[in-house]
């Protein structure tokens, strides 16, 4: 366990796998009638509560100064509340595998934002990767989701917002990491803040009574809470060990889990151009990843 805790590769595999489970879990929950805002709230409140209990058992405290509160609020919005709402809302229209492909775009957008905000200087390899990745993304976008069930361009556009928010979260969390803060502490604060945000959305949209529907999928709900809680412990540790760009590569593992589960377990299918576009995106991501070390 200690080897994984200090290994960027090990953390990447564990975090990406647990993240990838959110997609098939979310699709099954949606098919059972659970609204996206309720499932997203379950993810954040469930994970935040489990991790907070772990903190209490270790007699750790949650930082509540201005820097911590700012971090919790901003990280909650751009890293969890909004991305989870996008994923769970778009997935019924685009498919779990398709949304998994959207995850793979986050390293490319992370590099773009790194360049824009001066975290990194642009180089030829990185720019080539961005161009190739965008070409692949455009190709995937034209297929508009599962074969035989084309989604509207509006849903495709919403799906593409996912990697943009994930990339923004990757950059922000490293840039504004509170001094001396621990990984579990930040996971707890961010997720409880996201849970509060989603609770407000549920009340405003009239979806709060649908909380009762979680009782109809108890095993799935528990599995989601446990996988989310575990994922975010490793997620914040990977942020420390690997940095924002390396962290963004959890999207590869998550996409693989989503595509495999979507096609083999959920009966999804995609046309050749979707797969071809995914390969082109992967090539672009390989270039942008190499650019980080050149």
Image: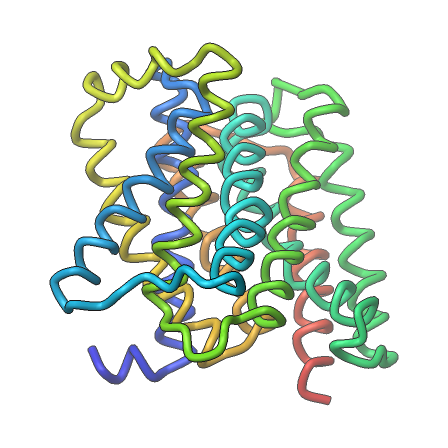
- Residue 272, x across and y down, in percent: 66, 39
- Residue 13, x across and y down, in percent: 38, 67
Q: Quadrant where the N terminus lies?
A: bottom left
Residue at position x 41%, y 60% in the image: 64
Relative vertical location of residue 105 with respect to residue 218 in this rendering, above or below: below
Residue at position x 49%, y 30% in the image: 88
Furthest residue toward bottom: 294
Which residue is at the front of the view, 118 or 193?
193
Q: Which corner quadrant of the image does residue 237 belong to?
A: bottom left
Asked if residue 10 lies left or right of residue 110, the reply is: left
Asked if residue 133 lies left or right of residue 12, the reply is: right
Furthest residue toward front: 65
Relative vertical location of residue 294 with respect to residue 144 in this rendering, above or below: below
Q: Which corner quadrant of the image does residue 222 belong to?
A: top left
Which residue is at the front of the view, 59 or 174?
59
Residue at position x 45%, y 81% in the image: 241
Q: Quadrant where the C terminus lies?
A: bottom right
Tell me how the rendering is colored.
rainbow
Relative vertical location of residue 27 with respect to residue 60 in this rendering, above or below: above
Which residue is at the front of the view, 33 or 92?
33
- Residue 19, x across and y down, in percent: 40, 51
Residue at position x 61%, y 25% in the image: 147
Which residue is at the front of the view, 91 or 280?
91
Asked if residue 281 lies left or right of residue 35, the reply is: right
């Amino acid at each position: 366990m200690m080897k994984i805790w200090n290994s960027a590769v090990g953390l990447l595999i564990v975090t990406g796998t647990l993240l990838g489970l959110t997609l098939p879990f979310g699709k099954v929950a949606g098919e059972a009638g659970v609204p996206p805002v309720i499932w997203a709230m379950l993810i954040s409140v469930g994970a935040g509560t489990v991790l907070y209990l772990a903190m209490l058992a270790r007699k750790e405290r949650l930082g509540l100064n201005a820097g911590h509160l700012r971090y919790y609020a901003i990280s909650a919005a751009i890293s969890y509340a909004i991305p989870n709402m996008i994923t769970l809302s778009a997935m019924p229209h685009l498919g779990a595998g398709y949304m998994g492909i959207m995850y793979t775009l986050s390293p490319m957008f992370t590099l773009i934002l790194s360049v824009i905000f001066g975290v990194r200087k642009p180089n030829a390899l990185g720019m080539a990767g961005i161009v190739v990745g965008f070409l692949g993304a455009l190709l995937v976008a034209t297929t508009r989701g599962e074969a035989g069930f084309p989604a509207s361009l509006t849903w495709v556009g919403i799906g593409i917002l996912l990697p943009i928010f994930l990339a923004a979260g990757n950059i922000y969390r490293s840039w504004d990491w509170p001094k001396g803060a621990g990984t579990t502490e930040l996971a707890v604060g961010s997720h409880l803040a996201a849970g509060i945000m989603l609770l407000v959305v549920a009340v405003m949209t009239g979806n709060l009574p649908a909380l009762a529907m979680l009782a109809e999928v108890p095993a799935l709900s528990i599995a989601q809470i446990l996988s989310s809680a575990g994922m975010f412990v490793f997620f914040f540790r990977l942020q420390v060990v690997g940095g924002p760009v390396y962290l963004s590569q959890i999207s590869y593992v998550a996409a693989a889990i989503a595509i495999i589960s979507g096609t083999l377990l959920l009966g999804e299918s995609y046309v050749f151009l979707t797969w071809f576009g995914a390969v082109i995106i992967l090539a672009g991501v390989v270039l942008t990843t190499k650019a980080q070390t050149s």
